[in-house]
Amino acid sequence: MTQTIAPRVRTLVLLLLATAGLLLTTAGPASAHAALTGSDPQQGVVVDKAPDQVSLTFSEQVALSNDSLRVLDPKGKAVQQGKPFEVGGTTYGVKVHSGLPDGTYTVTYQVVSADSHPVSGAFTFSVGAPSVTSVSVSGETAGGGVVGWLYGFGRYLSYAGFIVLVGGGAFVLACWQRGAGVRPMQRFVVGGWLTLTSATLLLLLLRGSYTGSGKVADIFDLDLLGNVLQTKAGAALVSRLLLLAAAALFISVLFGAYDKREAEEKRDLTFGLAIGGTVVAAGLAASWAMAEHASVGLQAGIAMPVDVLHLLAVATWLGGLSALLVALYRSQTPIESAAVGRFSQVAFGSVVALVATGVYQSWRQLGSWSAFTGTRYGQLLLVKIGLVAVLVGIAYISRRWTAQLADTVVRQGKRAPQKERVAANASGSAKSAKEAGGAESGAAKKDGGRKQTGGAKKAGSAQGDGSKRAAQLARQQAAMDTARQKRTRDADPHRFGLRRSVLAEAGVAVVLLAVTTVLTQTEPGRTEEEAKAATSAASSSSSSSSAQAGSGAVTLDMSFDTGGTDGKGVVTVDVDPARVGGNEMHVYVQRPNGRAFDIPEVKVALTLEAKKIGPLAITPDHITTGHWSASNVQIPVAGDWKIAVTVRTSDIDQTTVSKNAQIG
């Protein structure tokens, strides 16, 4: 039976790895936390007068490069001038040449969100009237292509290496200290370290091309690498490499000096290794938490330590599970049931921590029940939850096998006297051969020295043959004992059942890791729904503005983010009839989901930069929740007025957003 297990194991592992690879290759380009929530001019709008600048508003702050924002005329020629700049909050702009002729213009953007993912896209607007354009934006996708696939695969390897390194080390130190001297276990943990180190170096090289051009040729561009090192993601990868140097020291002590110490000496060293290993493992986990989803958005100060705890729980559970699989299938030293029982307790605690932190992360990233089924992030999260439930079910079966597992060490210990007898017989044979040689030499001396030289040679030859034969017999007997021990171990039905259930757990874990990798590259459901709400509001505003064009009323929608807790929303300004003289102004503040947003203060200022008039301060009265109004707002002359709205959501959190409107 055991002879057919190994091929089945290899086949199952290959199938699982193929499934993981399929999930990664079909993941597509990386979606990101940041999403475009508005623009000025708006997408698809036709404006009478060419704008002086084009601005884009995102759901969170982004990082810009010199070519992040481009404006192309109908022939594909760039008409932007200067570098992109921050307008305010999460709005970014770029100046365009003055006096743009009529036609359709294309705006392309490629930025990096605060959680390290590239964001790209394009839209069009027209001046005067729409026209035919030759600009193609089908290839404007960040994080795609060969480089995007390699980056996703590198992320998968980095997670796998982290899990094996941390989980394997914890398994040896906390559950099976005898494993420190087991060669397959040593190779397993060292392999995790090598995988994580190699993957981190790969990600560092790919990062510049991944967030930029996406070209394979740019992977080894030293200028891009220098720019990457100045970013948050680059600093996190470098920190990870430094921590891996400390992890190498931990491994060398665990599998070197630790294994050679006596039981009493191991106690102090175990405590030191546990403290040092925990610090290094937490630091490695923080290199993800400080640069990805947990570092931005709602409650980032709480989310980052929760994410660290979540990663450590995953590594302890799945990495320890993989180490147990190695011990059951590859180790010649049988693992005792007590060690399996200790891991069962550790795994239970890890699952509890995993569920608790996972519930918080799900609430933070989704925000509503509808996001579970209405967003890609929520759908992937449902798949992940299902896989975790399957793992827990299989783990329950493993716990039952553990309870029934006989202690193999005791049974193998009964065969120790037989080994000692074989060794004693081999030693006795060598000793007898030596004594026989000595007696024969003494007889030669009594014979008056006759044939002394020949006798000595004959005795030496007999002694050498006897020693070699004894050593050969000892090796053969040891090999037979090892084979018998392995057959006895594999014949144990409880151990055989445990091996199968642990193998099934490891298989599900491989797929779970692939789903998790794709999940970390997907735009959170909360952000996706906010972006949809903002886009809908912008579309409604555009329709409203078009409908009111005949009456002269102006409606402007502006997204804002004060940077504090609950600081995002949309402010709408209505100016009626938008002409010289007295006007009615209404200001509405809404949350991203469209509900009225009651905030402490709203102020408005009007500026006509062309004639250096303003800012004219306006303090509207608070009418009801999310609604402010001001009557008889005097606008002295006609022109392209800048309407700036200052929004304060708390005592210290406020921001100013603005748009231009033709009045008069």
Image (cartoon, rainbow, N blue to C red):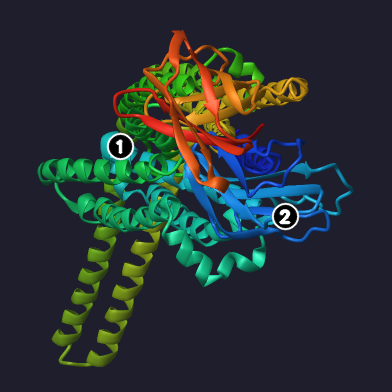
User: In the rendered image of this protein, does residue 398 appear above or below residue 120?
Assistant: above
Find numbered disc 2 in the image and state the secondary structure of the residue it sits on. Answer: loop
Residue 472 percent location from the top left of the image: 39, 62
How crowded pointer 2 is (Cα within 10 Å; few <14, some 14-19, many 20+) is rated as few
Nearer-N-terminus badge (2/1): 2
Towards the viewer: 136 or 500: 136
How crowded pointer 1 is (Cα within 10 Å; few <14, some 14-19, many 20+) is rated as many
Does residue 369 appear left or right of residue 405 in this picture? right
Mark drawn on residue 176: 1
Does residue 461 appear left or right of residue 664 in this picture? left
Does residue 374 appear left or right of residue 84 in this picture? right
Q: Is residue 545 visible?
A: yes
User: In the rendered image of this protein, does residue 409 appear above or below residue 186?
Assistant: above
Give the alpha-carbon distance from disc 2 to disc 1, as whole Å: 76 Å
Find numbered disc 1 in the image and state the secondary structure of the residue it sits on. Answer: loop
Quadrant of the image for the N terminus? Answer: top right
Mark 2 vs mark 1, foreground winner is 2
Residue 256 percent location from the top left of the image: 25, 56
Report the residue marked by disc 2: 99
Residue 412 percent location from the top left of the image: 34, 35
Towards the viewer: 444 or 410: 410
Badge count: 2
Towards the viewer: 24 or 118: 118
The residue depicted at 51 percent of the width and 52 percent of the height is 85
Quadrant of the image for the C terminus? Answer: top right
Looking at the rendered structure, the kind of residue marked 1 is Trp
